[in-house]
Image (cartoon, rainbow, N blue to C red):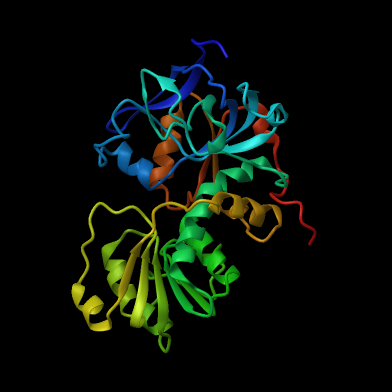
Amino acid sequence: MKPNMTSKAIVFTGVRQIELREVSLKPLSSTDVLVETWWSSISTGTEKMAFNGLIPSPPFIFPFIPGYETVGRIREVGGHVNQELVGKFAYIAGSFGYEGVNAAFGGASQFVACPVESLTVLDGIENPQCGIALPLGATALHIVDLAEVRGKKVLVLGQGAVGLLAAELAKLMGAELVAATEPSANRLKHSPADIRINPETEDVSAALAGHEFDVLIDSTGIMPAIETGLRFLRFQGRVVFGGYYQRMNIDYSQAFQKELSFIAAKQWAKGDLERVRRLIAEGRLDTEKIFTHHHRVDESITEAYLQAFTDPDCMKMVLTWKKEAETYAKPCHTAQP
């Protein structure tokens, strides 16, 4: 790779300002790889907050390249990297390999230069687009691990991408019962939960009458919803916060009276990305249902971000960087029915 190689990238230039511009990539080191992006996606949690200027700290200092949900094909590798990786599809957790622009987390670029250890090669996944789901699945898996769900009753608040995958993984990991609340009918219909409740059209207390949950998983960030959920926890129940929260503001009385335990989940743990890759490849985790919207990367890119941030029916917006990427319509796994 030439030292002055440039790449088309999505750049947040200021509060609620997005541009598609050329950026310069740092030279490839001996342990780096160069990946050509086929798909990336939009985070409706962290990136939405950064878009609105609500995270004014590194690495979210304007201008910056967002993106930690990127899948592409390896085009070039450094001298100390296995040459057999060239041509393979891989998930990239972002990159800091740019000059003159910050990276937070730097995956929304046509070409990405990054250390080889930051890749997860997508072996066994027939449709590599499904690799976009690795960070969401790994985040949900980490949440479920922290929740220790085996043999327990679990209440999941919110059935966005992470909440939905958390509900599915909770069942996969041996939860006795999974209930979920979600105000969007379109999201709720995809939920694998045993009990599905729309709090805007149903009485949550009536729907959960007779149930006492061991674990509450929150993926909403909505304090009144969390407070309502706490009412259904047993004594010494566990609460796992699965999102990113500016501030916590809930009534302490229930936590005090029930001696509740609160756990904050930070993304994923080491090995979780590979665990999720295997689950997808084996056909045990269905990630395709979260890919609800697609948008080609072009000068109208701001429209894609606004829809992802404001449309409740948009669970996960997939950004397509190459025309060939639009033809993929295979299942995510190769497992036999």
In this view, 161 is above or below 146: above
Quarter of the image where the C terminus is located: bottom right
Number of marks: 0
Residue beneath the point at 60% across and 50% down: 274
Query: Is residue 170 among the parts visible in the rendering?
Result: yes
Q: Which of 302 and 78 is in front in this view?
A: 78
Q: Which of 131 and 13 is in front in this view?
A: 131
Where residue 257 sits in the image (x, y, percent)?
A: 23, 83
Where residue 247 sits in the image (x, y, percent)?
A: 22, 55
Residue beneath the point at 59% across and 54% down: 276
Write down the quadrant of residue 104 in the picture: top left
Where residue 224 sits in the image (x, y, percent)?
A: 27, 67
The answer to whether 282 appears left or right of 166 in the picture is right
Name of the residue lying farthest toward the bottom:
210
Name of the residue lying farthest toward the right:
336
The answer to whether 263 appears left or right of 127 in the picture is left
Name of the residue lying farthest toward the front:
80
